[in-house]
Amino acid sequence: MSFPKRLQKQLDFIMRIDDLKQIIRQTLLISDRRQENDAEHSWHLATMAILLQEYSNVEVDLLRVVQMVLIHDIIEIEAGDTFCYDKEGQIDKKAREIEAANKIFTKLPSDQAIHFRKLWDEFETTLTPEAKFAAALDRLQPLLQNFRTDGESWLKHGITRKQVIERNHHISEGSKLLWEYATWLIDESVNRGYLKD
């Protein structure tokens, strides 16, 4: 039986992104303290977008936000996950990710490849209200996880309050209220000994 070439490319891409489940992050899951994978992270962000949309600084196109958070880490299949506090890994992160985006999105039919790449670029440049809100969620989620796991990952890597604030203060660009909550979480984490002052 013959099927459209477009369908085959789409299905091949779907099978390729199954590898996202193998990209391990430093953030721990609350229940069993195992490290989260990128697919779990992306799903969590999409759910957060739906639930927390009302706290965006401005009205956003929810579908665009959900699309961004679902595809923003796909490039890590090729580029790997770079721990956000790894200074050495940050040096060539952008170049590795651009190369990965050029490679992975082109596996889709051209119209979808262009759409996914534009979404990824929009998320990375963080200029639109949707990208700012998506980025805010991307920063908030690990804070919530770290707080609920007694700062285990922060303590393991010797992360300080200053580092967490520098990394996450951009949350306010997407949601001032979520940044207020994040600031409370950070302060409370220091008080509880989950995070070094």
Image (cartoon, rainbow, N blue to C red):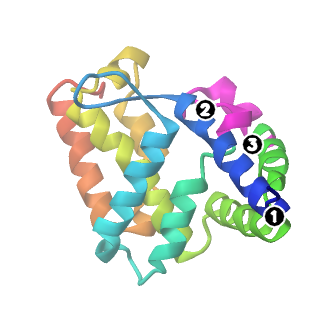
Location of the N terminus by quadrant is: bottom right
Q: Residue lying farthest front?
A: 1
Can the viewer see residue 166?
Answer: no
Mark 3 or mark 1: whose residue is earlier in sequence: 1
Q: Is residue 144 left or right of residue 59?
A: left
Tag 1: amino acid: Pro
Rendering coords of residue 181 (x, y %): 24, 56
Rendering coords of residue 43 (x, y %): 42, 50
Quick one: SS at disc 3?
helix
Tag 3: amino acid: Glu
Q: Is residue 19 left or right of residue 180?
A: right
Residues packed near mark 3 inside 10 Å, few (<14), some (14 to 19) or many (20 plus): many
> Tag on residue 81?
2
| Marks 3 & 1, CB-CB < 8 Å contact | no
Q: Report the front residue among 60 and 42.
A: 42
Residue that label 3 marks: 97
Residues packed near mark 2 inside 10 Å, few (<14), some (14 to 19) or many (20 plus): some
- Which residue is found at the position 67% from the left and 33% from the top? 90
Nearest to the eye among marks 2 and 1: give it. 1
Position of residue 127 relative to residue 161, above or below, is: below
When asked about the image quadrant of residue 100, the answer is top right
- Which residue is found at the position 82% from the left and 58% from the top? 2
- Which residue is found at the position 66% from the left and 42% from the top? 15
Which region shows up in magenta? Answer: 76-95
Position of residue 18 relative to residue 65, above or below, is: above
Q: Residue lying farthest top?
A: 156
Quick one: SS at disc 1?
loop
Per the model, the C-alpha gap separating discs 2 and 3 is: 10 Å
Q: Report the front residue among 174 and 19.
A: 19
Q: Residue lying farthest bottom?
A: 59
Residue that label 1 marks: 4
Per the model, the C-alpha gap separating discs 2 and 1 is: 34 Å
